[in-house]
Image (cartoon, rainbow, N blue to C red):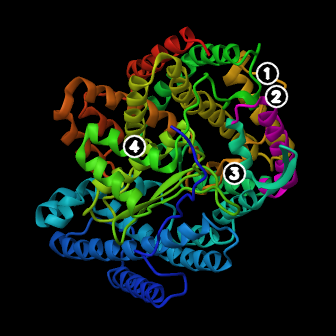
Amino acid sequence: MTKTAEKLPHWDLSTIYQGLDTPDFEDGLAAAKQQLEKLEEVVRENEIDRLERVPSDVSRAALVLEGLLTRFDETLKSINTLEAFVYGHVTTDSYNQLAARRMSELERLLVRVTKASVRFESWIGSLAPTMEKLCALSKSIEEHCAVLERMAEESRFLMRTELEDLASELQLSGGGVMWKLQGNVTSQLKMPFERDGQTELLPMTVLRNLANDANESVRRRAYEVELEGWQHVREPVAFALNCVKGAGITLAERRGYDDVLHTALVRSRIDRETLDALLAAMRGSFPMFRRYLKSKAQKLGKAKLAWWDLFAPVGETELRYSWDEASAYIVKQFASFDDELAEFARQAFERRWIDAEPRDGKRGGAFCMGIPGPEESRILANFDGSFDAMTTLAHELGHGFHNHCQKGLSQLRKGSPMTLAETASIFCETIVFNAALAEVPPEAQVTILENQLLGACQVVVDIYSRFLFESELIKRRAQAEVSADELCEIMIGAQKETYGDALDPQHLHPYMWLLKPHYYYPDLNFYNYPYAFGLLFGLGVYARYREEGAGFIPRYKELLRSTGEGKVADLASHFGIDVRARDFWDASLKVLGEQVDRYCELKG
């Protein structure tokens, strides 16, 4: 397995629109605006909003509701397709001013959609006592019953309509646009880096990838240059973070939530009992992960890991993959589970649904987005040929397959709460990991296990540090703005509490708050614990597959298809899983504990 100099693919967006200023895009934009106007007209004419009393004419309400479901589906499909297309340009080229302008234009339409949605949700809350009768009168309403019941329940957290309108409008100029500032600043930052006698300006995405270098000198200098770079931009990004969290605190209070975390729990469709069980299991696993990190330090010939050693490769066997090797391997392993999954991945590679090349102006990390119009997905990656990069591809393809399993559903029935959004991705990543571990000789197993345990450590230990950081940030932000120095102090404190004595306390990462985009999404506060939930839930679901075999697959696909509708606890119960019980989470962590045991036995 070798990595050769190769041209990595950029994704093809032409099946959606030909360009940002082409006639087909203009036609799509005009059609979306027309559909939105029709939706607004129906909302206005039928006085859709919270009602003082339950309507007596259920038949008429059913007719209006049927029409609204159709209007919302058409409007959301059109606008979300446009948004995905533009986002595909914004995230791969932050210098593209036309894309930025188009995104701003679409955001104004999305505000109008939000206003209509608020009125619709408030109205559905008023119809809740008649929901059973409404479902009996209409097949379309019956199909949306789970979604409508959830809307009715969540409608109790809506402010008065005029206040929700104001909140939506302020998103265009306040906390709602701060993710752009963070994204543009971090993606355009470049720092000089000397290597092999030559100095070049490296984008931060490329510089951060050097954390995987086998040479400690390279890793340490990259870490030091990275921290120096973040110092140059920390003030504007700290300002952005204060805006986002300040808005979140105000809106949570105004909408009647207990706090900002409560907002996230409702969005995640779990309760505090579930979160408490998850967090307790995560805390209980810290000694296990510290044992892994200490063993890694020994394998690297060190007494203790510094932050720049966290992602260092371990083992004498370096697993490297060309793009073609990685894609072929993933398709092959997916086929061992299910032909439909393998065919989906094959199409993603062949049709250039993946943007793989790290480059200036491109966002770091990886994500998958669905494209409603053609019902396709696009995956952003920053491929460097490592085993980790290959499993990341498998992970993101899992997200894409999740979208694939929801083909044909209306826009209101699609999607997933954050807690279940990682189910398919963890599943697919586990398929590739288990196959690789079974195939390689013992001397290479440590490399495979290192990749798995490093990822799990990030999702459990580091994610918990991010949860602690955001909790403390919100507590302080409720009293006053939080300075960049304080943000660094909070982050270091959170890392010490979670990593403990496994890392050198003099060399941690104070700027994790700056580079992680999750903190800056205005509607996704506490976008951290869902990753741990997803990893451990995914491992639990995979364990069910190992027990049941091929008969599990249809139920698995049905779970993926239905994640946009039900509550997490109800969906999990179909697999005999009680997410409120710590035992379930401990059982998933036990699987990782066995891998830690094996890792510690192996030589580096």
Can residue 227 be seen? yes
Cα gap from disc 2 to disc 1, whole angstroms:
6 Å
Q: Secondary structure at mark 1?
A: loop
Q: CA distance from mark 1 to mark 4?
A: 36 Å
Write down the residue under mark 1. 504
Residue 562 visible in the picture: no
Q: Amino acid at mark 3?
A: Thr
Rendered image: mark on residue 330: 4
- Residue located 42% across and 84% down the image: 28
Q: Amino acid at mark 2?
A: His
Q: Name the residue tied to disc 2.
A: 507
Mark 2 to mark 3 CA distance (whole Å): 21 Å
Q: Earlier in the sequence, mark 3 or mark 1?
A: 3
Q: Quadrant of the C terminus?
A: top right
The residues colored magenta run: 213-237
Query: Marks 4 and 3: in contact by CB < 8 Å?
Result: no
Residue 130 in picture, x, y percent from top left: 21, 60
**Which sits earlier in the primary sequence, circle 1 or circle 4?**
4
Work out whether 117 lies above or below 472. below
**Residue 205: numbered disc:** 3
For residue 100, above or below residue 269:
below
Relative to the observer, which residue lies in front, 124 or 392? 392
The first of marks 2 and 3 along the sequence is: 3
Q: Say left or right for 529 vs 436.
A: right
Q: Is residue 171 left or right of residue 83?
A: right
Name the spot of residue 174 as percent of width and height, x first.
Answer: 69, 66
Q: Label 2's element? A: loop
Q: Nearer the viewer, mark 3 or mark 1?
A: 3
Name the N-terminal-most of marks 4 and 2. Answer: 4
Examine the image and state in which quarter residue 489 appears: top right
Residue pictured at 28% horizontal, 63% vertical:
127
Give yes or no for contact between labels 2 and 1 (Cβ–Cβ under 8 Å): yes
